[in-house]
Image: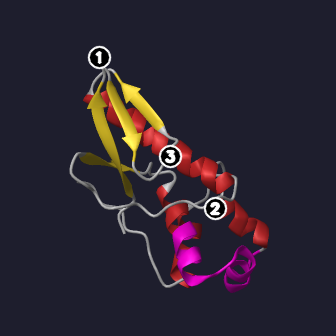
Amino acid sequence: MTYAYPAKFSQDEAGRVLVEFVDFPRSATDGADMNEAMSEAINCVGSAISIAMSLKEEVPQPSRARNGTRMVPVPLSIAPKLALYFAMREQGVNNSQLARSLGVTELVVRRMLDPKHETKASRINQALATLGTRLVVSAA
């Protein structure tokens, strides 16, 4: 799975670039130009995901790109946590079950999923491997 969400980019009367997310209808941002709008969009989608995860709300899977949309990547600081979040949900594994598999406390797993808590990549990779998956980072 690619961790990028589709967004509609349009221009308002003042020439600012507006960004609206397909999967996060309550999230929107803008920028003075396309580069600034994309940068703001990355921050915006990261914030939407972080808030949902912090509130223990459902984070939607990224939908496919559609005509008139551009894909906005999830910030690198959040992508590993999001991968773990989705892997756990797909397999029906809760925090306590993963903690037992890893030989750690449930608090450690909670922190791995907390967007505000810095987690070492090796810790998340270990958790993903336990779930039979891995995170691959690529540049385009």
Mark 3 neighbour density, 10 Å: few (under 14) some (14–19) many (20 or more): many
Callouts 3 and 2 close, C-beta under 8 Å: no
- As drawn, 117 above or below 19: below
Q: Amino acid at mark 1?
A: Glu
User: Is residue 115 visible in the rendered structure shown here?
Assistant: no
Q: How far across and how far down the image is residue 20, in percent?
A: 39, 39
Q: Quadrant of the image for the C terminus? A: bottom left
**Residue that numbered label 1 is attached to:** 13
Q: Name the residue: 61% across, 53% down.
A: 52
From the viewer's perspective, is 6 left or right of 118? left
- As drawn, 102 above or below 37: below
Q: How far across and how far down the image is residue 134, in percent?
A: 44, 75
Q: How far across and how far down the image is residue 61, in percent?
A: 45, 64
Q: Which label belongs to residue 113? A: 2
The local secondary structure at tag 1 comes to loop
Q: Which label belongs to residue 5? A: none
Q: Which residues are magenta?
A: 84-104
Q: Nearer the viewer, residue 95 or 111?
A: 95
From the viewer's perspective, is 73 left or right of 112? left
Q: How many marks?
A: 3
**Residue that numbered label 3 is attached to:** 46
